[in-house]
Every structure is written in C-alpha cells, then in structure tokens.
Image (spheres, rainbow, N blue to C red):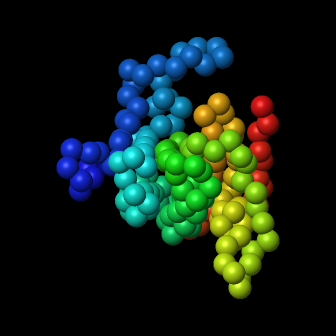
Amino acid sequence: MADVRADRRAVHWMVPSPWQWQRSDTAEHSLLEEGWKHPVLVIESRAADLAEARHATAEYVRDACPWVDRDAVVLVVSELLGNAVRHTERGDWILCLRSQGAVLTADVQDTSTAPPAPRRPDLAAGGGMGWHIAEDLTSSLDVLPHAHGKTVRAEWHAVDGWQADRPVGRRVTRMALC
C-alpha cells in the first residue's frame, strides 16, 4: 500500500519470516513459531496523515483480526494518534500494529515524555473523553516511557472458546515507571 504523495511510502509492512530468529530463555525460535501469522504494520507521521493511518488500520484489522471490532480499534488508534499530535511539540508519531495469536496490539510512539493525564470529560467545552474511550474499548492500555518519549500500547484479546465480535474491555491502565 503506497502513499499517494510521490516517492514516499506511508505504510511499511514488515513480514516476519522463518529465518528471523530470536533468542528465548531456553532456545532459539522463529517469530512464526510464536504465533506471528500476519505482517506487522508500521506507519510514520512523516509519511502519512491521520486519515491514511485510520484507513490502513481498518484494512489491517479486517485482514488479520476478524474477531475484533474494527470500528473500536480504529477509534482507539485515532484517539491515540490525535493525542500524539496535540500533546507533543512536533506532533511526530509512529503506529505499529501486530497480531499474534488471539491478541491484537497497537503501539503509538510519540516524542513526549509526559504521561497521559486523563481528565474529566467536558461536554460543553469538548475534550477529555478520548483516554476514557480507549480504556473502555481495549483489553489493556499501557504507557511505556523511554528515552525519546513514550509508547502507548493498546491491546485487544479474543476470549477463549468464543467467536469474539468485539473486544473485551477491562478498563485497566498501567503506567510503567522507569
């Protein structure tokens, strides 16, 4: 899937292969042996806008995770990317989607080291609802700080023995402190 802008790729597909080996605690194994059956989708803000990211997310979920509520995933990704644009100095972000077994993970990396500050929703002035929506529509929501900013990780888990039509929300947020 290529960007419409000349000479720029908006979407990068990284396909794990049997020849990509990682070291586990006890033995070497491939990503495919760990359940990686679908490519990893990576989108960078320097090559794509929010609309392109939402469209690519919807396509990825349709193809890789038919058990998850596509609209819920697109909404959460949209909220997280919007927060990255609004609450960082440059507005740069990287979106990474991957499906492993019955788990869909969306990582949104940005350049701000400040953790998200959920606030009370204000319907009159607008705002304050995005983080709460993301919590309600995901199985887990984590904030992982690092030297160049942070990564917000949203996960959706399929329920064992059930053909999941939508994600099971746990309303759990964890912030890793380094």
Quick check: 17 left or right of 71? left
Residue 123 is situated, as x and y percent measured from the top left of the image, at: 71, 83
Report which quarter residue 125 is drawn in: bottom right
State whether residue 68 appears in this view: no
For the point 64% across and 14% down, which residue is it?
26
Task: Judge whether 18 appears above or below 11 on screen.
Answer: above
> Where, by quadrant of the figure, is residue 7 drawn?
top left
- Residue at point 57% right, 49% down? 89
Q: Which residue in the rendered view is the most extreme toward the left?
A: 6
Relative side of 22 to 11, left or right: right
Q: Position of residue 88 (x, y in %)?
A: 59, 51
Q: Position of residue 167 (x, y in %)?
A: 62, 62
Q: Quadrant of the C terminus?
A: top right
Residue positioned most to the bottom? 124
Question: Residue 158 in the image: x percent, y percent?
Answer: 61, 55
Answer left or right for 28 relative to 112. left
Q: Is residue 17 left or right of residue 68?
A: left
